[in-house]
Image: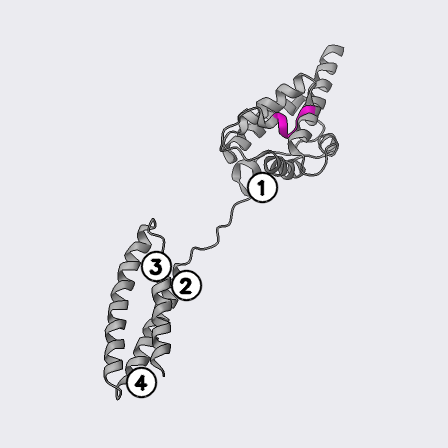
Amino acid sequence: MATANWESLLQEVVIEVNAIPDDQIAQINVKFVLAQILLVVGTLGNAAKADSQMHASKYSCIENTINSVNMLMTALKPKEHHEKSLLEHKAISGIKNLGSDKTGFRTWHEKFVNAMSQTIPGSREVFKWIVKKANEDDTENIDELSWDNQGFDQTVKEFKKYGEDLWCVLMDKCEGEAMTRIRTAKEGEGILAYGRMYKWFCLLYTSDAADE
């Protein structure tokens, strides 16, 4: 095989070695190992150029070394990270479904907020804001602009993402009248949907208490 092919393969290995991030300690050690391999490969390459009779066997050795390096680099590529959905979290899966029982809503609400706070840090402040809006009869102003003005912790997801995640959880945990209230909002508008549901349950509870 031509010397040019050998030099091309060697160059590919050099590129792959240089592509290893320096801030990853485990791979820095690998970079050192690969540097030693390159030293051997370079030595063999020089010998192959100088000795035409042994050129073929030495080239084969070089090619095998490079193939081994490529296999190592493939193994080092980071695995795809599977982000667990909210419904897969134990805290969320352990929440009982909410139906039409108004007397148990406050307890359910407290447990639901605790579960969301465990899975998405900063959620407690989000629900305090939703409850405040509901108590002020201002749920229709639960929107992205109002959200941005709250200055929530940076760990809390942005408005649309949080609303989508909350919507998915509510669709899984609500039934009966609770589901009816959730569906008054558009798909993905979980924050608004929760505000409307909270307002409905609390008004219903207050009305029944007054009748008694």
For residue 46: magenta? Answer: no
Task: State the quadrant of the N terminus.
Answer: bottom left
Inspect the image, locate mark 2, and give the three-letter code of the amino acid beneath it: Thr
Near mark 3 (Cα within 10 A), the count class, few <14, some 14-19 or many ≥20, is: few
Report the residue marked by disc 3. 18
Q: CA distance from mark 3 to mark 2?
A: 15 Å
User: Can you see residue 108?
Assistant: no
Residue at figure coordinates x 71%, y 32% from the top left: 182
Does label 2 or label 1 sit earlier along the sequence?
2
Where 32 falls versus 138 (above or below)?
Answer: below
Does label 1 or label 4 sit earlier along the sequence?
4
Comparing labels 3 and 1, the label whose residue is closer to the camera? 3
Foreground pick, 109 / 25 = 25
Q: Which mark is residue 74?
A: 2
Residue at figure coordinates x 51%, y 46% from the top left: 83
Residue at figure coordinates x 52%, y 39% from the top left: 90
Span shown in magenta: 141-146
Near mark 4 (Cα within 10 A), the count class, few <14, some 14-19 or many ≥20, is: some
Report the residue marked by disc 4. 56
Foreground pick, 11 / 154 = 11
Residue 146: percent from the left, percent from the top? 62, 25
Q: CA distance from mark 1 to mark 4?
A: 59 Å
Comparing labels 2 and 1, the label whose residue is closer to the camera? 2
Residue at figure coordinates x 37%, y 58% from the top left: 19
Check whether the beta carbons of the residues at disc 1 and disc 4 lie within 8 A of each other. no
Where 154 falls versus 82 (above or below)?
Answer: above
Check whether the beta carbons of the residues at disc 2 and disc 1 lie within 8 A of each other. no
